[in-house]
Amino acid sequence: MAESSKKIIIGCDHAAFEMKEKIKTFLISLGIEVEDAGTDGEKSVDYPIYGAKVASAVSQGLVRRGILLCGTGLGMSMVANRFPGVRAALCGGLFAASMSRRHNDANILVIGARVTGDVLALEIVKTWLETPFEGDRHQRRLELFNRLEDMAGGQ
């Protein structure tokens, strides 16, 4: 697996704690170093805190990829995509996971723990890790993303 020597940061809210632990175990079994940004239990927390920890680390280049989980994945997606250089993709299936990498070079995978079963979630993670970015015309589009970030930052 191409990413096996890479480090991944993972974070979740209380609704996705159990799934985060399963995904961490899966990543470790693949030989991937995992940095856990929390949360550390099922007690109610504010998901933006954990989303920001993961997205900030990816945005700053401290890690290349991250995984975020919450009940639906919607909140974590919204938080993560506020950070420069972050391309967080909410994926509820294998096709979305594959295309998020092939065409968008997604650097944060987001999964909704209350809408995605554990077995499918692990397959989504595996697909996302194994799928390369295709580049070419898709790279031009990512450069447009960067220009949009620059324009938004200048307002």
Image: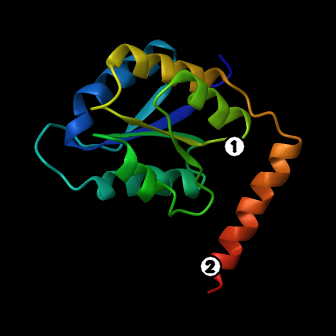
Instruction: Give neighbour class at mark 2: few <14, some 14-19, many 20+ (Cα, 10 Å).
Output: few
**Disc 2 to disc 1, C-alpha distance:** 21 Å
Label 1, on which residue?
A: 104
Contact? badges 2 and 1 (CB < 8 Å): no
- Can residue 134 be seen here? The reply is yes
- Above or below 106: residue 134: above
Name the quarter where the C terminus is drawn.
bottom right
Instruction: Give neighbour class at mark 1: few <14, some 14-19, many 20+ (Cα, 10 Å).
Output: many
Residue at image position (16%, 37%) is 41
Q: Is residue 51 left or right of residue 105?
A: left
Q: Which amino acid type is shown beneath numbered disc 1?
A: Asn
Q: Is residue 139 left or right of residue 21?
A: right
Depth-wise, is mark 2 or mark 1 nearer the camera? 1
Q: Is residue 71 left or right of residue 139?
A: left
Residue 153 is tagged as 2
Percent across and percent down for residue 15 are 21, 38
Name the quarter where the N terminus is drawn.
top right
Task: Depth check: give the residue in front, 7 or 131.
Answer: 131
Percent across and percent down for residue 13 are 25, 44
Query: In terms of secondary structure, where does tag 1 sit?
Result: loop
Task: Depth check: give the residue in front, 112 or 105.
Answer: 112
Where is residue 34, by image quadrant? top left
- Can residue 4 be seen here? The reply is no
Percent across and percent down for residue 65 are 56, 40
- Above or below 152: residue 142: above
Residue at the limit of the structure toward the bottom, as seen here? 155
Query: In terms of secondary structure, where does tag 2 sit?
Result: helix
